[in-house]
Amino acid sequence: MAEEYIEVRTTIDKKDVAVEIARMLVERRLASCVQILGPIESTYWWRDKIDTTEEWLLTIKTKKDVYFELEDAIKNNHPYEVPEIIATQIVGGNSDYLKWISDEVR
């Protein structure tokens, strides 16, 4: 693959904010597609105690070369003090789908 593709994940506790961030990332051409899954339940350590929160999971399809701009866009629009932002490299996939990612992400 000439280009490197990634899937980025983040979680948000309000669906309307998840929808806003998804739309913003696609409008800015930082993502070809954002899927919103949920609600899911997350259990985690925060400020010396265990917390559980209902959240929405965003899976974001994009190219590796826009990752840092995408990360900044998420951080600047995310309500969490420390948002989960994790990128995983896509090592293979439908070549037509991967081309579509290239065509849609600037």
Image (spheres, helix red, strand yellow):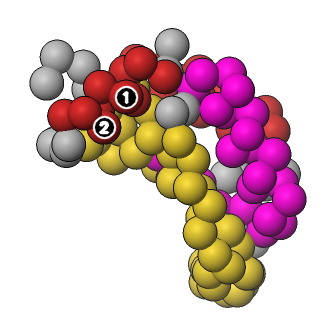
| Viewer-side residue, 9 vs 102 | 102
The span picked out in magenta is: 8-30
Q: Is residue 6 visible from the viewing direction of this image?
A: yes
Q: Is residue 60 left or right of residue 29?
A: left
Q: Amino acid at mark 2?
A: Tyr
Q: Secondary structure at mark 1?
A: helix
Residue placed farthest to the top in the image?
106
Image quarter where the N terminus lies is top left
User: Any mark on residue 83, and which?
Assistant: none
Name which residue lies at 44% across and 33% down: 62
Res. 48 image quadrant: bottom right
* Distance in Å between CA atoms under marks 2 and 1: 5 Å
User: Any mark on residue 97, and which?
Assistant: 2
Question: Label 1: which residue?
Answer: 100
Q: Is residue 73 above or below residue 78?
A: above
Q: Where's residue 77, x and y in %?
A: 81, 39
Q: Amino acid at mark 1?
A: Trp
Q: Where's residue 34, x and y in %?
A: 57, 47
Q: Where's residue 36, x and y in %?
A: 62, 61
Q: Are the two marked residues, 2 and 1, in contact with CB atoms closer than 8 angstroms? A: yes
Crowding around mark 2 (Cα neighbors within 10 Å: few <14, some 14 to 19, many 20+) is few
